[in-house]
Image (spheres, rainbow, N blue to C red):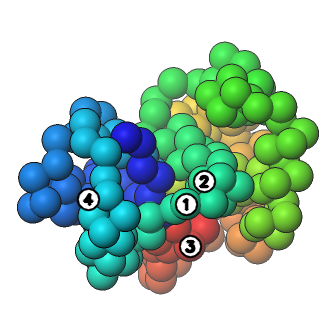
Amino acid sequence: MILHIKNMVCDRCKMAVERIFAEKKFSILSMELGLVEIEEELTELETEEIGEKLKSIGFELLHDKKIMAVQRIKDLIVKLVHYSEEELSVPLSAFLSAKLQQDYNTLGQLFSQSEGTTIEKYFIAQKIARVKELLADGELTISEIAFKMHYSSVAYLSNQFKKETGSTAGEYRTSQMHHRQNLDEV
């Protein structure tokens, strides 16, 4: 049985969800951001109990197919931007269509209706959030960050960063306030 879970955005989230299923003695076959596949079929009562446990730690068990699709889009983008070093070899639209086995126009309309923004703008927001993390860490130069985040140039990263945040990457790096935003809030 596959369960869709909202707000699973990091490895610690996966560990927290894993503990809930372990407490209930369910066998996890696979887990990735936003998805848990278990061996057992859950009864309505078990589904309710799991849902309540998840809710108590900030997650949500999803049931609506449209909401699940939007959450899968978000999870795939978060995984791609924050946890993958590989550059996309195809356009984001083709990547999402292949992963979700749906037409990109349909996915885009669904996402926009649900989130009030486009998939592309969400992708950019996630990239900028990751760039902010890397700037705050102070370990990489802006040039190295541009390369790591697969920007075509430092100038392109700088322009996009300024457009999205109102400050330059250099100004952000030297500022004393590095407010880290939760990934589920981006």
Are the residues flagged by discs 1 and 2 in contact, CB closer than 8 Å? yes
Residue 125 picture location, percent across and down: 68, 59
- Residue 68 is tagged as 2
Residue 56 picture location, percent across and down: 30, 81
Q: Quadrant of the N terminus?
A: top left
Label 4: how many residues lie within 10 Å, few (<14), some (14-19) or many (20+)? many
Q: Nearer the viewer, mark 1 or mark 2?
A: 1
- Label 1 vs 2, first from the N-terminus: 1
Number of marks in picture: 4
- Label 1 vs 4, first from the N-terminus: 4
Label 3: how many residues lie within 10 Å, few (<14), some (14-19) or many (20+)? few
- Label 3 vs 4, first from the N-terminus: 4
* Identity of the residue furthest to the top in this view: 89
Residue picked out by circle 3: 185
Q: Quadrant of residue 70?
A: bottom right
- Residue appearing at x 48%, y 79% in the figure: 179
Residue 43 picture location, percent across and down: 32, 58
- Label 3 vs 2, first from the N-terminus: 2
Label 2: which secondary element: helix
Q: Which of marks 3 and 1 is in front?
A: 1
- Residue 63 is tagged as 1
Q: Tell me if 164 is positioned left or right of 181 in this view.
A: right
